[in-house]
Image: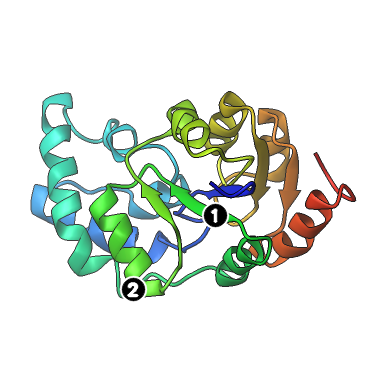
Amino acid sequence: MPDLVVGFDLDLTLIDTAPGVRDVLGVLGAELGVDLPVDELVARLGPPLDILLAPYLPAEAIPAAGDRFRELYPEHAIANVPVLPGAHEAIAAVRRHSGRVVVVTGKFAPNAQLHLQHTGLDVDLLEGWVWGVGKAAVLRREGASVYVGDHVHDVEGALAAGVTSVSVLTGGCTAEELRGAGTHVVLPGLDDFPAWLDGHLTGLSGP
């Protein structure tokens, strides 16, 4: 196993899933006959879908709605979802240091894999359907020393694993929220990650 292993979240860290999720929620709401506040839900992306839908559907309807969301996803939320600026370059930066890249995401793994294939993101491992502190077990198992995410729950996973938490401001959380959650580093986006990683590995920057 390489000395350097870097974990990345997927949604709003490596890819901009907002357009795709917006479209899927629109179709799902129409099918269910429910006026879902799509823009509000998209602005709060991060927690699992079940949590996002809970205020708008009866509890007994949520599992089936989640299943239908995942069924609709490949048709409505892959082709219209781009990589975020700097994503390919961030992965390449890990490669330059002979490192390994793992994606640890709360997304349903088969749909996450479709995103990786569509965008050409070159990763060594994808682990799906893990959220918050649940990400820690994967990060420890893979020997990660850094985890990059956009949400306070990504920070929780990194801290629970005892790794350096790097947060980017491409999701719904502010720098103040991320620092309040305990992240070690806040970057505007992945464009800034290669320089940070170079400094981190030579002891010139950050934890």
The residue drawn where x is 63% and y is 27% is: 162
Q: Position of residue 176 (x, y in %)?
A: 73, 38
Determine the image quadrant of residue 61.
top left
Q: Position of residue 40 (x, y in %)?
A: 41, 48
Q: Position of residue 126 (x, y in %)?
A: 38, 51
Report the disc number at residue 100: 1
In this orientation, which residue lies closer to the viewer: 183 or 160?
160
Report the disc number at residue 118: 2
Determine the image quadrant of residue 106.
top left
Q: Position of residue 131 (x, y in %)?
A: 41, 34
**203 vs 135: above or below:** below
**116 vs 132: above or below:** below
Farthest residue to the front: give it.
1
The residue drawn where x is 45% and y is 51% is: 103
Q: CA gap, disc 2 to disc 1?
A: 20 Å
Amino acid identity at mark 2: His
Question: Tag 2, which secondary structure?
Answer: helix
In this orientation, which residue lies closer to the viewer: 60 or 2?
2
The residue drawn where x is 48% and y is 26% is: 133
Indicate which label's residue lies in the foreground, 2 or 1. 1
Q: Assess whether mark 1 and mark 2 are in contact (beta carbons under 8 angstroms).
A: no
**171 vs 141: above or below:** below
Instruction: Compare marks 2 and 1 and give the one earlier in the sequence.
Output: 1
Residue 21 falls left or right of residue 190: left
In this orientation, which residue lies closer to the viewer: 179 or 31?
179
Q: Where, quadrant-wise, is the C terminus in this rendering? A: top right
How packed mark 2 is, by other alpha carbons closer than 10 Å (few <14, some 14-19, many 20 or more), is some
Amino acid identity at mark 1: Arg
Question: Tag 1, which secondary structure?
Answer: strand
Residue 87 falls left or right of residue 207: left
The residue drawn where x is 45% and y is 67% is: 122
In this orientation, which residue lies closer to the viewer: 17 or 96?
96
